[in-house]
Image (tube, rainbow, N blue to C red):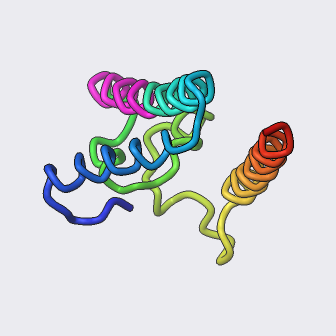
Amino acid sequence: MLPNIPPKLFSLSAIVVGYILIDDATANEQNAIGNWLMLVAQVLSTNAFYRAVMQERGLEPVGSTETGRNNADTFSGMQGQSAGNINTNTNTGSSSDNETLIMLEKMVRAMQIEIDNIKKSL
C-alpha cells in the first residue's frame, strides 16, 4: 500500500501536505483538521500495537500485519485462520470489504457536504 520511498522523503511529504492544508484556513479550522488527523493516526497506531499484542499471545498469525489484509476477520471469531482460507467461495471480494467501501463513500460524501457548507459560510 505504501510506496517504497526513503523515510526522509516520506516524512518530507507529510510536511508538505501540512503546509498545503494551512493555506487559507483559520486557526480553528487548522486545529480541527489537525485533531482529525491525529485521531486517524491514533487509530492506526492503536490497531497496530494491539495486533502485535494478539500475535504475542498467539491469537493472530505472525505474518498478518505484513500481508495487508483487513483485520476484521481476526477479531470476529475467525482467529488463527490465514487470509487464504477466508471467503474462498467468492471471486469478487467479501461482504465486509463491500460494507467498508460503502461506509467510506458515505464518509467522503459527508465530508464533502461539510466542506461545501464551510465554503458557503466564508
Identified at 38% across, 61% down, the residue is 1
Q: Quadrant of residue 41?
A: top left
The residue that appears at 34% across and 26% down in the rendered structure is: 49
Q: Is residue 37 above or below residue 120?
A: above
Q: Is residue 5 left or right of residue 61?
A: left
Q: Residue furthest bottom?
A: 91
Q: Position of residue 115 (x, y in %)?
A: 75, 45
Depth check: give the residue in front, 69 or 33: 33
Q: Residue at x 44, y 34 (%)?
A: 44
> Residue 94, image x and y in percent?
68, 61
Q: Which quadrant holds residue 78? A: top right
> Magenta stretch: residue 54 in it?
yes
Q: Nearer the viewer, residue 79 or 54?
A: 54
Q: In the rendering, at what x and y percent does residue 114 appear?
A: 80, 41
Q: How would you classify the magenta stretch by its main secondary structure?
A: helix
Query: Residue, x 33% and y 50% (percent of image)?
Result: 16
Q: Quadrant of the C terminus?
A: top right
Q: Which residues are magenta?
A: 44-57
